[in-house]
Each structure stands twice: as C-alpha cells, then as structure tokens.
Image (cartoon, rainbow, N blue to C red):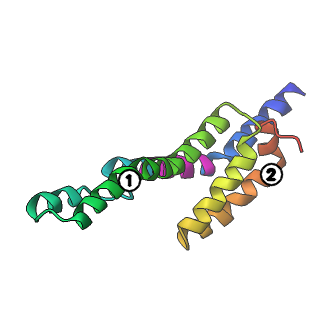
Amino acid sequence: MEEMAKKELKEGKRQLEGVLILCWVMAILLGIAVFSGFGWGSLDFIRSYLSGPFTLGNAANIMGSIISFPFRMVYSLIGPALYIAELIGIYQRKSFAVPLGRAVLVITMVFFFPVGTIIGAILWKRFNDPLSKKYLNYEY
C-alpha cells in the first residue's frame, strides 16, 4: 500500500516536470530582461538633456521619467516573481501551486502568443491530473 502511494507521488511529480521547466525558463528570461533594462525605458533622456539646450519640455520629461521609474520597476518585477512563486510552491508541495500555476499558464498564453498558447494548452492538463493534485496536496 505504501509502495503504491510512493509511486503515485512520483508520477504526480513527473506530471509537473514540464511546468517546472516552463517556470525556470520564463523566470530566467524575464529576470534577464529586468536586469538588462528592457521595459524600464532607457537613460537616453539624460544624454539628450546634457547635449541639448535647456528647455522646460526636457525638464518635464526628466522629472516624469524619474517619477515613473519606481512604478515601472515594480511592474517589471511582477512577471518573474509569479514564476518564482510557482517554482517555490511546486518544490515545497504547497496547495496554492495549482491555482497559481493555472494563472501563470494563462499569463504565458496571453503575453507570449502563439507559442505560449501552445505550451500552455499542453501543460494545462497537467494541473488537472489527480496525481499531480495529490502531489501538491490540493483538495478542492
């Protein structure tokens, strides 16, 4: 009986391997994008200010960029944080990993269309598998 439970848990873990790979790849890619400055805007506004004459329009652009930087930073970090939270949930076998995993798949399907949609459709059934739900202690 105990051997069967170990086999079921092993099969449940195997069902989630594709999701783990997706989360690792997306967390790394989005992390690289955040640290490279993609999505934050560039610092070209300072160079244009230093090379050109002083105008109120340039000053307003600089102030707007400085003020909006923290908000852009927070929104840029939400993506990698979701994938990392999903990885933590799966590795620690937490029940929140199932709904969060579905949300991560939806985000992948929407923002990385059409490749993300194909991958998400393939991996969606993994969360519906009873053995993967049992592995993640998800009872609903």
Image height check: is 96 above or below 72? above
What is the span of residues highlighted in magenta in the rendered image? Answer: 19-29
Furthest residue toward front: 56
Q: Residue at x 75, y 42 (%)?
A: 12
Q: In terms of secondary structure, where does tag 2 sit? A: loop
Residue 129 placement, left or right of 64: right
**Can you give x and y, in whole percent of width and height, for residue 59 in the image?**
25, 59
Kindly indicate the quadrant of the structure image that contains residue 87: top right
**In terms of sequence position, does the residue under pointer 2 or pointer 1 come before the other?**
1
Locate the N terminus by quadrant: top right
Q: Amino acid at mark 2?
A: Asp
- Single out the mark in the foreground, 2 or 1: 1
Q: Position of residue 2 (x, y in %)?
A: 86, 25
Give the residue at x 44% y 53%: 72
Mark 2 highlights which residue? Answer: 129
Specify whether residue 25 is painted magenta: yes
Residue that label 1 marks: 33
Residue at the spot x=56%, y=46% of the render?
Answer: 83
Amino acid found under the numbered disc labelled 1: Ala
- Cα–Cα span, label 2 and label 1: 33 Å
Quadrant showing the C terminus: top right
Q: Nearer the viewer, residue 74 or 119?
A: 74
